[in-house]
Image: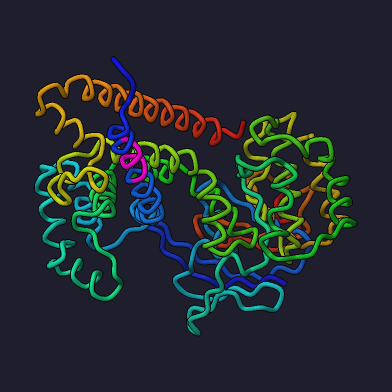
């Protein structure tokens, strides 16, 4: 499903990670500064590894030895950032439709409706991102990523910018997503409780190294 | 003060034509350069930046003279364009447009560059993760978000172009109906006995045009801020 074997030097910090993810939700766990975001950015193609390979869904998207580096926009991934990064000049409906337009996909009303219902964002469609609450923004960002029909969804601390109440508001949507959306995910968090609820497999990162790997039990 | 005479109208309309053409032709180059300076690092970037700003600090007569040497009938570029493409700049209104475009360029590029620099690059990254190729990112995210700055640059460039005097008169002289813009008409009128009233009318026209442009630029700048905040 997802195979990562990379090395990357970032200033003083060295990142070296090897793992194979098979589960529906790979939880990437570690303290801030452990290299989680750099790792996810490499899977997304936003950052280039110094050495190694990344394979998504059987396709080699990075192989430094063979000189392969598939650019981000051709990786068919979805990425939900901590700060939703909705396009401020587009309304919610246009944000949701962006990935479909860019990928030249034909409209899929059934999928569109399913995801909008799943995330409860139907009522927000005409609004501008500036008029949304933090939780609403994050739900729209999830919808936007899913509607581009990614083969892998990357979520980098999607709840990190929200307060406790908002987190509890979004978490059920993520659980539903895991169970119903049928897209494998890489979920980055420094919150063990969050990952216990969501992840099916854990990759634990400490100072740029994978220290444990396995089921949710490794969080204990 | 009496009405604007036909000769004055000729100068006003010529100025408008020269400034509009200069602005429209300079805009794509301005956007490309603004993007380059805002988003790319390359060898010679500071030098390029300095060259773009040169017309702002050089005496306009120097810029006009350099244009004459380069784009005149016997100039390196001017000769080639005249012989091969039939485009002549010297002593033509097109030359006035070229001079105005060059003089206005630094003012035109600056707001464009600032507005591109102000765009959160992470939005462009987000667009890439959604499958947008770099040129699509530019046209669907960068340019729309920079649009108020692009328009502000066009307005400022237009205002500069319509008031340009030194480089224009040096390069294409002061021929009524062909290269005599508002500024050169005023210059001629104040050297003519009884030209004061006509000069006064053109001065008022200049002030109105310049003020209008500044107010428009300010309005676009405020729109830009609102747009970047997603309201």
- At a point 29% along the width and 47% down the height, the residue shown is B105
- How far from the left and from the top, in percent, is residue B133? 57, 64
Residue B14 falls within the magenta-colored stretch: yes
Write down the quadrant of residue A128 in the picture: top right
- At a point 62% along the width and 36% down the height, the residue shown is A161
- How far from the left and from the top, in percent, is residue B150? 44, 43
In terms of secondary structure, what is the magenta stretch mainly?
Answer: helix
Between A79 and B147, which is closer to the camera in this rendering?
B147
Between B188 and B50, which is closer to the camera in this rendering?
B188
- At a point 29% along the width and 21% down the height, the residue shown is B204
- The quadrant the N terminus of chain A occupies is bottom right
Q: In this view, does B14 lie to the left or right of B221?
A: left
Colour setting: rainbow
Q: Is residue A77 left or right of residue B181?
A: right
Q: In this view, does A117 lie to the left or right of B201?
A: right
The residues colored magenta run B12-17
- At a point 78% along the width and 36% down the height, the residue shown is A124
Between B139 and A191, which is closer to the camera in this rendering?
B139
Tell me if residue B39 can be seen: no
Seen as rendered, the residue at the extreme top is B1
- How far from the left and from the top, in percent, is residue B19? 33, 43
Tell me if residue B20 can be seen: yes
Q: How many marks?
A: 0
Between B182 and B144, which is closer to the camera in this rendering?
B182
Q: In this view, does B125 lie to the left or right of B48?
A: right
Residue A6 falls within the magenta-colored stretch: no
Write down the quadrant of residue B184 in the picture: top left
- How far from the left and from the top, in percent, is residue A18? 59, 70
């Amino acid at each position: 499903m997802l195979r990562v074997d990379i090395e990357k030097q970032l200033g003083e910090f060295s990142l070296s990670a090897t793992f194979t993810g098979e589960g529906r939700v790979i939880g990437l766990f570690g303290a801030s500064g452990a290299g989680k975001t750099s790792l996810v950015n490499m899977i997304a193609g936003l950052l280039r590894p110094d050495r190694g390979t990344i394979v998504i869904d059987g396709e080699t998207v990075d192989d430094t030895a063979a000189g392969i580096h598939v650019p981000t926009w051709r990786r068919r991934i979805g990425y939900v950032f901590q700060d939703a990064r909705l396009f401020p000049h587009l309304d919610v409906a246009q944000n949701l439709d962006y990935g479909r337009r860019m990928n030249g996909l034909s409209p899929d009303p059934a999928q569109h409706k399913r995801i909008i219902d799943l995330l409860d964002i139907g009522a927000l469609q005409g609004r501008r991102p500036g008029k949304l609450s933090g939780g609403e923004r994050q739900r729209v960002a999830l919808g936007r990523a899913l509607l581009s029909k990614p083969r892998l969804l990357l979520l980098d601390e999607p709840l990190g910018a929200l307060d406790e109440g908002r987190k509890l508001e979004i978490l059920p949507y993520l659980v539903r997503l895991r169970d119903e959306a049928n897209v494998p995910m890489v979920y980055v968090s420094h919150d063990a409780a969050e990952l216990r609820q969501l992840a099916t497999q854990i990759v634990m990162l400490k100072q740029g190294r994978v220290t444990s790997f396995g089921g949710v039990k490794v969080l204990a | 003060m009496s009405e604007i005479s036909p000769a004055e109208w000729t100068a006003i309309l010529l100025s408008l034509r020269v400034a509009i053409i200069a602005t429209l032709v300079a805009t794509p180059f301005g956007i490309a350069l603004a993007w380059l300076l805002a988003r790319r690092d390359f060898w010679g970037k500071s030098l390029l930046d300095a060259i773009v700003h040169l017309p702002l600090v050089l005496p306009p007569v120097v810029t006009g003279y350099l244009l004459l040497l380069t784009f005149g009938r016997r100039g390196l570029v001017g000769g080639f364009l005249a012989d091969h493409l039939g485009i002549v700049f010297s002593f033509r209104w097109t030359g006035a447009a070229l001079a105005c475009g060059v003089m206005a360029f630094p003012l035109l590029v600056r707001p464009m560059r600032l507005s591109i620099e102000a765009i959160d690059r992470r939005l462009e990254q987000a667009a890439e993760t959604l499958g947008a190729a770099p040129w699509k990112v530019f046209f669907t995210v960068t340019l729309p978000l920079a649009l108020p700055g692009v328009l502000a640059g066009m307005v400022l460039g237009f205002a500069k172009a319509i008031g340009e005097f030194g480089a224009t008169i040096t390069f294409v002289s002061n021929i009524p109906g062909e290269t005599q813009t508002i500024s050169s008409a005023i210059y001629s009128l104040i050297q003519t006995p009884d030209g004061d009233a006509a000069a006064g009318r053109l001065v008022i026209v200049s002030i109105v045009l310049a003020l209008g442009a500044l107010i428009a630029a300010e309005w676009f700048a405020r729109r830009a801020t609102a747009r970047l905040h997603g309201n």
